[in-house]
Amino acid sequence: MDGAKASAVSSLLPDWVLENKEIDTTEGLKNCSTEEAYLIVLDTFFEVISENADEIEDYYRKEDWKNYVIKVHGLKSSAKTIGAMALSEQAAKLEKAGLENDIATIKRDTEALLLRYRSLPEG
C-alpha cells in the first residue's frame, strides 16, 4: 500500500489506534486485502479482547493445554493481522511451548501475555 492510501485510511482510524504503540497500522494495512477490511478486522479484534483473554485464562487455569494452544494460535494470527506484532510474537512463543508440552514456559509467560493483550486498547 502506498503512503497516500495509508494516510487516507489513517484519517479513518480512531486517534487511540494511531497513537497505540503496540499497533503497527502500516503492517496491519499490508496484512489485509483492503483498507475497509483492515478497519473491520481491527474493530472485531478489539470487540472480543475481554472474552478471548478470559477464555485463554480459563484454559490455562484448567490446564486444558489443547484448547489453550488453539486460542493462543488464534490470538497469534489475529494480532499479526492488525499489526500487533509484539503480541503476536508472544503468542507464537506460547503456542510453540504448548505444542512442545513446555508447561513451565506456559506457566511463566501466560500472565504477561494476558496483561499485554488486555491492555492493548490503552496503547
Image (cartoon, grey):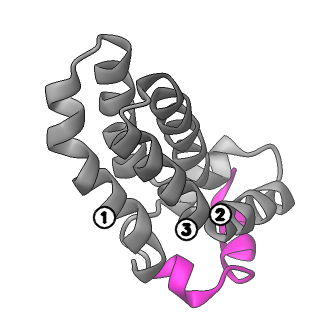
Percent x, y of residue 52: 57, 55
Label 3 close to label 2 by CB (< 8 Å): yes
In the rendered image of this protein, does residue 101 appear above or below residue 10? above
Kindly identify the amino acid type of the residue bearing the numbered disc 3: Ser
- Residue at the spot x=20%, y=43% of the render? 109
Cα distance, mark 1 to mark 3? 11 Å
> Is 121 included in the stretch rendered in magenta?
no
Residue 50 higher or lower than 121, as above or below: above
State the separation of the CA atoms marked 2 and 1.
Answer: 15 Å
Q: Residues within 10 Å of mark 3 (few under 14, many from 20)?
A: few
Q: Amino acid at mark 1?
A: Leu
Residue position for label 2: 48
Q: Image quadrant of residue 2?
A: bottom right
**Would you say the residues marked 2 and 1 are in contact, meaning their CB atoms lie under 8 Å apart?**
no
**Circle 3 — which element?**
helix
* Residue 121 rendering spot, x and y as whole percentages: 48, 77
- The residue beneath circle 3 is 50
- Residue in the picture at 31% in, 64% down: 115
Q: Residue at x 23, y 55 (%)?
A: 112
Q: Which residue is mark 1?
A: 115
Lower sequence index among marks 1 and 3: 3
Which three-letter amino acid code belongs to the residue tagged 2? Val
